[in-house]
Amino acid sequence: MDNTVVDLETLQSLYDKKAQKDEMEKIEQHIKTSKDKDDAKPLDKPEQFLFQLSQIPNFSGRVFCIIFQSTFVECISSIFRKVEILQKVCMTLKSGQSLMQVLGLVLAFGNFMNGGNRSRGQADGFALDILPKLKDVKSSDNSQSLLSYIVSYYLRHFEEDAGKETCVYPLPEPQDLFQASQMKFDDFQRDLRTLRKDLNACCAETEKVCQVSSEDQLQPFKEKMEEFLSRAKTDLEAQEKQLENTYKIFLELGEFFSVKAKQGEKEVSPSTLFSVWHEFSTDFKEIWKKENKLILKERLKTAEEIFKQAREKASYSVKPKQSSGMKAKLTQKI
């Protein structure tokens, strides 16, 4: 997980550091001492800007809220994108029709190859760790792997759009699987707890600023912050529910594939489940791309032959046969 969730206590400290207070005191002292001097040096632009900011009532509290507003949007969006990828991968692995067809072929061909073995030739399933090993099972002449045969068979018998741009990859994308394998639910939960804590702090700070601000200093801060806080609470609650739902789907997926937690893990982790799929999908897609190109070439060649035959057929001119029998002669006389 990246470190986009920032503790607002750290942000608040940016405006409470002794060095910055000392700087403001120096600026204020300079303004007082040079007020009646004709040759006094004016403040540089950075110092002028800092002094003008300090004149804003409740400046520190207002900045605290504004910074959190921009930070919250970035953080919640980052979490949403990652959880969405994780949920999408889980749903595809559990109920993707094309993926199930691929797994069915793996089981069928595996049983066929083990047909002479009573204990292994009639298996009802297989462990996931077999998937990355399919590329290492070679034909007798070592010209083709079991994985390449499965990919070719799938495209030629199950995929109507094989060789076309509309052909859809049947497995989750390798990049999505890799990202999913790097995620941790503990990190998501920790980041959401931090956001919840900081959101509560922002609510308290906003209320404080509104209480001590005069009527002419209240807007547009109050209106904009109230609108943001209302939306932020809704977004955070929705994200917490989405994470809870995704976590449930993930656990069900682990049970579906009978994956067991590694030694030292309390339960199956995304790394344990998705790393195997990432390796398999990477190998599968490389062969899938090559086979699609081969099928496209075959279709182009077939189309060229059909066009050639049609053109040759059109070049022949067939003359109608002239009747020369007795019946034809009598017909002509009549």
Image: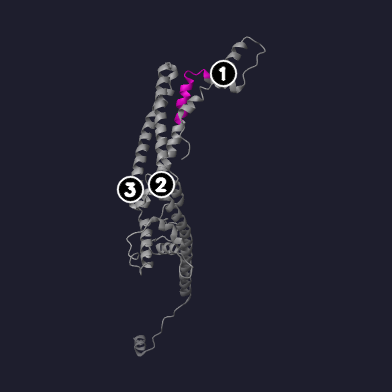
Identify the residue under disc 3.
252
The type of residue carrying mark 1 is Asp
How many marks are shown on the rendered structure?
A: 3
Mark 2 vs mark 3: which is more N-terminal? 3
The type of residue carrying mark 3 is Glu
List the single residue furthest toward the right.
39
Give the image location of residue 183, x and y in percent.
43, 44
Identify the secondary structure beneath mark 2.
helix
Mark 3 closeness class: few <14, some 14–19, many ≥20 residues within 10 Å: some
Foreground of the two, 165 or 123 = 123
Q: Nearer the viewer, mark 2 or mark 1?
A: 2
The secondary structure making up most of the magenta span is: helix
List the single residue furthest toward the bottom.
326
Residue 185 in view (yes/no) = yes
The type of residue carrying mark 2 is Pro
With respect to residue 56, does 190 lie above or below? below
Q: Is residue 56 magenta?
A: yes
Q: On the image, which quarter does residue 47 sit in? A: top right
Foreground of the two, 310 or 221 = 221
Give the number of the disc on residue 9. none
Mark 1 closeness class: few <14, some 14–19, many ≥20 residues within 10 Å: few
Identify the secondary structure beneath mark 1.
helix
Residue range corresponding to the magenta coloring: 54-69
Mark 2 vs mark 1: which is more N-terminal? 1
Identify the secondary structure beneath mark 3.
helix
Tell me the CA gap for discs 2 and 3.
Answer: 12 Å
Q: Is residue 159 magenta?
A: no
Mark 3 vs mark 1: which is more N-terminal? 1
Identify the residue under disc 2.
270
- At 44% from the left and 48% from the top, the residue drawn is 176
Identify the residue under disc 1.
22
Tell me the CA gap for discs 2 and 1.
Answer: 50 Å
